[in-house]
Image: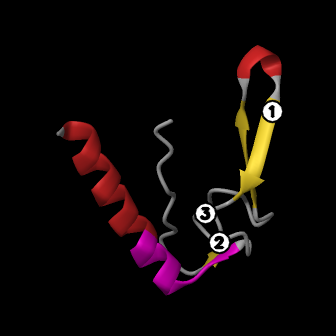
Amino acid sequence: MYDMSVPNSKPGTCAKCNGTGTFQWAGGYGKVKSGPCHACRATGKQTVRDMYRNKAYNRHKLSRMVF
C-alpha cells in the first residue's frame, strides 16, 4: 500500500482523518476498513511537530518508491 501522510498547512484539525483520529479507506468487495490515523497519531489534531514528521515520512516514502 502506498499511503502517504497528509501534512496540514497549519496546526489544527487533521486533514487526513478530519479530526476523528481514525483513518478509513476502501477495502476489497465494497468494505470499508479503518485504523488509527498516523498523520496525527490518533489525536485528531496535527501539531507543528506532526507536520514536520509527515513531510519527512513522505520524502522517505517517495525515495523508496523511486529507487
- What span is colored magenta in the figure? 45-53
Image position, residue 49 (x, y; %): 48, 84
Q: What amino acid type should be assigned to the residue bearing mark 3?
A: His
24 horizontally vs 5: left or right = right
Image position, residue 2 (x, y; %): 46, 39
* Tag 3 residue: 38
- Main secondary structure of the magenta stretch: helix
Local SS, label 2? loop
Which residue lies at the image location 44% right of the left edge and 67% below the top edge? 54
Given contact means CB atoms under 8 Å apart, are the residues at marks 3 and 1 in contact?
Answer: no
Image position, residue 43 (x, y; %): 73, 75
11 within the magenta span: no
- Say which label, 3 or 1, has the lower sequence index: 1
Q: Which mark is residue 32?
A: 1
Which residue lies at the image location 80% right of the left edge and 63% below the top edge? 20
Local SS, label 3? loop
- Say which label, 2 or 1, has the lower sequence index: 1
Given contact means CB atoms under 8 Å apart, are the residues at marks 2 and 3 in contact?
Answer: yes
Image position, residue 26 (x, y; %): 71, 30
Q: Gap in Å between the C-alphas at discs 2 and 1?
A: 20 Å
* Tag 2 residue: 41
Local SS, label 1? strand
Q: Gap in Å between the C-alphas at discs 2 and 3?
A: 5 Å
66 horizontally vs 53: left or right = left
Of all residues, the one furthest to the bottom in this rendering is 48
Q: How is the image coloured?
A: secondary structure
